[in-house]
Image (cartoon, helix red, strand yellow):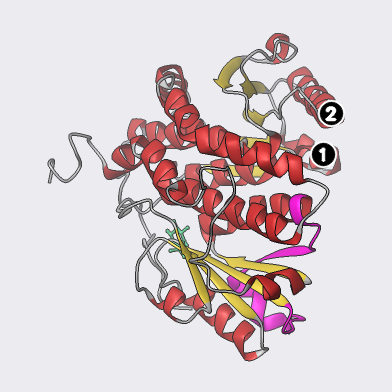
Amino acid sequence: SAAEKGGYDYFMLKEIAEQPKAVADTLLGRIDAAGSLTLDEVRIPVHELREVDKVVIVACGTAFHAGLIAKYAIEHWTRIPCEVELASEFRYRDPILGTRSLVIAISQSGETMDTLMALRHAREQGSKVLAICNTNGSTIPRESDAVLYTHAGPEVAVASTKAFLTQLVACYLVALYLGQVRGTKWGDEIQAVIRDLSQISGEVERVLETMEPVRELARSLADKKTVLFLGRHVGYPVALEGALKLKELAYMHAEGFAAGELKHGPIALIEDDLPVVVVVPSPRGRSVLYDKIVSNIQEIRARGARTIVIAEEGDEAVVPYADHLIRIPATPTLLQPLVATVPLQVFACELATARGNEVDQPRNLAKSVTVE
Ligand code: G6P
């Protein structure tokens, strides 16, 4: 009913709008007054977390994209090797797991059969399993050794939005916590990022306030057949998520690529007026990464692409190469997906509406896939 949708036309719009609160709720009670993380609820003893020699993340769909982003954070802040695998592939390749492996199963519903089978396989090998889940008492957390709940609240729309942002938050918390308990040379950075993370829901809110031009752009592209998405570093999984949203909702051909791979194939797809969304990392700090993506934008534009550039406020160097510019607030590099994903959700939702599609119930898809 309209009341359930909180005055919005679709659950998806409501859930996009709820993201600042979902993010804040997922942080609530997990950062203490001194700015340290308190994750006692994760009932894996600290001495065991100190001994973890490998992290393996398993998930499906949008949750898998959260896992891809988590890998960058976990390896950077903890120096523990981290693999991310589609749950449906994981157990069929005889993965190498041991008692010091920490397996993280990410699932909004807690009922995805592929993810459940992957975690059962991991536990049979003696690994500890931590679930990141949005549904209290569902099967995946019940069968795991520990759980960190995301507090997105119920997500009704099939295409995941607020659950994804809270999965990212939970992944960052786990990565920072592992860094905190193990002590790494990134101690100061970890402290600073915890501070930024505690402010991030306000930044998500600011992004939501500036989405009208994105909706207008989406409507203008309703007749297109293909949209490509490019990113580097954590912007790469954001590009994959942007493309997935567009497939799910708009039924358009959409693909995400690592921008560095352009020259190895995808650049052959560029033709006149092809919309290409590019997620640009912060110009501060990692300048090599930044310069490379700016030259990627120049390359595709020279070949006729219509460039849709998602760039940090104050980034002026991209302006000459952006046919459309979408601004996001400055964040630490690893946290950027929390703000960069939001315009892509709005973009896909509006494009689907413009094409007359059923936003909350896309054809052929299910919210929770309980078969293998
Ligand atoms: C389905 C949904 C996706 C979701 C995926 C994983 O395919 O349509 O939106 O990302 O399952 O679901 P989970 O509940 O495990 O996060």
Evaluate whether residue 308 shows in this view: no
Seen in the picture, residue 39 relative to 121 is either above or below; the reply is above
Amino acid found under the numbered disc labelled 2 = Lys
Q: Nearer the viewer, residue 130 or 235?
A: 130
Can you tell which quarter of the image residue 356 is in? Answer: top left
Q: Nearer the viewer, mark 2 or mark 1?
A: 2
Q: Nearer the viewer, residue 29 or 245?
A: 29
Q: Which residue is mark 2?
A: 292
Can you tell which quarter of the image residue 266 is in? Answer: top right
Is 31 left or right of 16, judged from the image as shown? right
Q: Which residue is mark 1?
A: 260
Evaluate whether residue 110 shows in this view: yes
Query: Between marks 2 and 1, how big is the CA–CA gap?
Result: 8 Å
Q: Earlier in the sequence, mark 2 or mark 1?
A: 1
Is 303 left or right of 204, judged from the image as shown? right
The residue segment tinted magenta is 77-100
Amino acid found under the numbered disc labelled 1 = Gly
Q: Secondary structure at mark 1?
A: helix
Q: Percent from the top left, x then y, of residue 305?
A: 68, 23
Q: Percent from the top left, x then y, of residue 107?
A: 48, 64
